[in-house]
Image (spheres, rainbow, N blue to C red):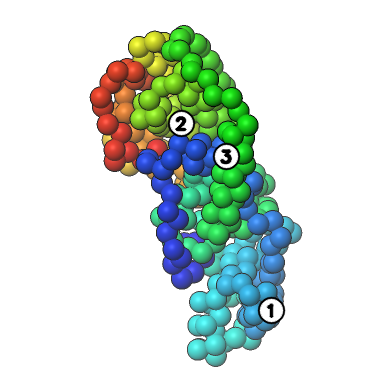
Amino acid sequence: MAENETPQDYIPINTEDSPSVVLELIYKLKVKDVMTTAVICGKKKDTLRHIQAIMRENRITGVPVTEENKLIGIISIDDIVKALDHGYINGTVEEKMTRNLIVLNADMPLSFAISSLNKYRYGRFPVVNKQHELVGILTSTDVIRALLVEMNREVIRLEKTPQKNNAAGYSEMEYATIKFDFELAGRASTEIKKALKKHSIDPHLIRRVAIASYELEINQVVHSNGGTISCSIQPDKVTIIAADSGPGIADINQALQEGWSTANEMVRSLGFGAGMGLANTKRVSDEFTISSKLGEGTTVRSVIFLNSPKEDSGISPL
């Protein structure tokens, strides 16, 4: 469970039909760019009454519990209310804190944070680094505030940028991915979208290409030993090839089923491993092929034709 908060308002942003400038921002920004870093923490030997006083003084509804900078639990306002009702307010934090937590990683794309906030409807999520040290707290307010600031900056930038009509041409690009390197995750899809915009390609087609490239990129970061995302932009189509060095897929038909995933508990605790990556990629593609060999790796080819009428509705890249 995550912190037992009262559900907050749904963030009015999704990864399907939000304006392209918003989509670009939520894939470009990382959790660490948005989170609150001044975190008030408690210790496991603190009393619940002491935590109650901290909450009242700082007007907060949850306190992370740390030990040597490591996140070990959370006490929420609901825990305090229960302690008052049942007469154990002088008990220790260690006895009543929530230990099984859903956390965000500081290097995650902001899109994953939005997905988690909307899915669980909790007021806040702890943010940890690669060493599982608590480095911040993320709330829906943090997300909305950051997006407003970044969109204002983008508007100013666009107003100062001369408009150009780019004819469709031909270009190639390739990006490397590294296992569990969430800091770089999303870079390839962001750069591919920028290149497509320069070619004045229809926004609906750009969205389909962005979904395919993003899903394949994240799949490599989460499931493979690392690989490459290649994109070829031609006058009539966009071809994306994701090739990794292993471990390979035992059953391709099973891997293409929605919700099926081999992600471990660590990956799932970070909000990844929903089992939608290959299924979403196949859905937005006009041509889709996949080959894999255990111990050697997997290659996925996605082609989207630039005159394709295929719709992208109902597709979630998370």
Residue 104 is situated, as x and y percent measured from the top left of the image, at 56, 50
Cα gap from disc 2 to disc 1, whole angstroms: 43 Å
Q: Judge the density around disc 2: few (<14), some (14-19), many (≥20) Cα neighbours within 10 Å.
A: many
Q: Which mark is residue 155?
A: 3
Amino acid residing under circle 1: Glu
Residue 142 is situated, as x and y percent measured from the top left of the image, at 58, 56
Q: Secondary structure at mark 1?
A: helix
Look at the numbered discs 3 and 2 and tell me whether their residues touch, using CB distance below 8 Å: no
Residue 20 is situated, as x and y percent measured from the top left of the image, at 45, 36
213 with respect to 164 (left or right): left
Query: Which residue position is annotated with label 2?
Result: 214
314 with respect to 163 (left or right): left
Q: Which sits in the foreground, 251 or 8?
A: 8
Cα gap from disc 3 to disc 2, whole angstroms: 25 Å
Say which of marks 3 and 1 sits in front. Answer: 3
Q: Is residue 308 above or below residue 317?
A: above
Q: Secondary structure at mark 3?
A: helix
Q: Which sits in the foreground, 246 or 300?
A: 300
Amino acid residing under circle 3: Val
Q: Secondary structure at mark 2?
A: helix
Q: Judge the density around disc 3: few (<14), some (14-19), many (≥20) Cα neighbours within 10 Å.
A: few
Residue 219 is situated, as x and y percent measured from the top left of the image, at 45, 32
Along the polypeptide, which appears first: circle 3 or circle 1?
Answer: 1
On the question of residue 131 being in view, the answer is yes
Query: Which residue position is annotated with label 1?
Result: 57
